[in-house]
Image: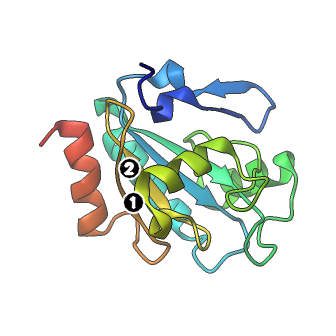
Amino acid sequence: MRMAPTAYDFSFDTLAGQPYPLAALRGRPLLVVNTASQCGFTPQYAGLEALWRARQAQGLVVIGVPCDDFGHQEPGDAADIGAFCEKNFGVSFPIMTKVHVRGDERHPFFGWLAETGGVLSRPRWNFYKYVISRDGRLRTWFTSVTKPMSGRMRTAVDRVVLGD
């Protein structure tokens, strides 16, 4: 009997076009966020960077996954996205190439999230945040309006980073 997939069964490509298999992060908690450079929630990059810096030493990996599925708010190419994130927010956490997060062309990771978390967990806008535990399972998720450094978000991240 095949085990149900986990986050570690998926892979992305970095902005440089290199494979980024999540299997290489097995045993580490993840925070995966669908991002966009021209969104009202784009300032959340600063909070994601702060969370990454605060918990990176304990194993947390924050992963930004740009998408242009909502309001054409990520029109740039990989070079544009990387330059924007670095210049405006000092982003040092991994940013992937732009993918679809909804529809028939969505990246398989986001299909898995929808199956695992249910219909309400599907990204309905930019900056949906997915907290993945060390065993690769979806622990919880947050909509765009939840700021990365909010108490709820930090508590959820601390639970997967430090344990319950």
The residue depicted at 26 percent of the width and 55 percent of the height is 156
Identify the amino acid type marked 2: Val
User: Mark 1 — residue?
Assistant: 141
Residue 31 in view (yes/no): yes
Residue 135 image point, x, y percent: 32, 30
Horizontal placement of 161 versus 23: left or right? left
Measured as percent of width and height from the top left, residue 108 is found at 65, 42
The secondary element bearing badge 1 is classed as strand
Residue 95 in view in this figure = no
Q: Which residue is mark 2?
A: 131
Image side of residue 163 versus residue 20, left or right? left
Crowd class of label 2 (few under 14; some 14 to 19; many from 20; radius 10 Å): many
Image quarter of residue 126: bottom right
Q: Give the amino acid at mark 1.
A: Trp
Residue shown at the point (20%, 46%) measured from the top left = 159
Task: Identify the image quadrant of the N terminus.
Answer: top left
